[in-house]
Amino acid sequence: MGIYLEDIEPFITQVRQSFLSGNLVLIGSFLVASIILFTWHYFTILHYQKRRLDSETQSLKEEIDRDQLTAARSRKAGTIDLENHFQHYKRTGESVAIFAFDFDNFKQINDSYGHDAGDKILVGVCNEIKKSLRTTDHIYRWGGDEFIIIYYGLKKENAQRFADNVIKIANNFSCR
């Protein structure tokens, strides 16, 4: 035929090298693409999990910061807010007005009419008081029938009027 193995051997070597280098490029490209894809998926999942955790944490914080019965802020939230405002007062000298109140003889209502009736009174009074508060003020359920209201930026000369308004709401509601 006129073709000798020695003549073909350089061609075969060249094809093999070309094939191997092509495979190496293909394998390298595949590995790089796989690493990029894996990294992208990893960070996407990590980002999704962080957002989910943040959302669940915020939801739990809101649940902890709210009294389940009255939807007033909780004692825990009140303690934190009072501490923060005390620190603010020490730095700036700006104070807040704090009004604490409870219902006289509330145990008698629970004993006479049942805890459901007592709960309805607490919820109703709390809702009415919330309607009278400014957006900057907060009501906290401190315990049983005890509440605290923090008035921000309230001038001393207006404090009595705000307190009288709360007492009026509570008295009017209990007369219903």
Image (spheres, rainbow, N blue to C red):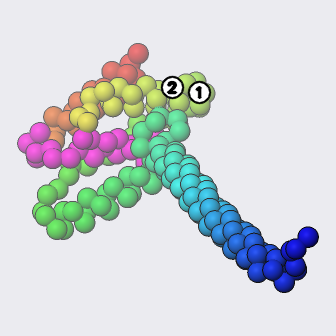
Q: Is residue 156 magenta?
A: yes
Residue placed under numbered mark 1 in the picture: 116
Q: Say if mark 2 contacts mark 1, CB within 8 Å.
A: yes
Q: Is residue 146 visible?
A: no
Horizontal and vertical percent position of residue 29: 63, 65
Residue 126 falls in image quadrant: top left
- How many numbered discs, if any? 2
Horizontal and vertical percent position of residue 6: 84, 84
Asked if 171 appears above or below 36 in the picture, the reply is above
Residue drawn at x 82%, y 77% as measured from the top left: 8
Q: Quadrant of the N terminus?
A: bottom right
Asked if 71 appears above or below 116 in the picture, the reply is below
CA–CA distance between discs 2 and 1? 6 Å
Kind of residue sitting beneath label 1: Asp
Magenta extent: 136-158
Front-lying residue, 122 or 133: 133
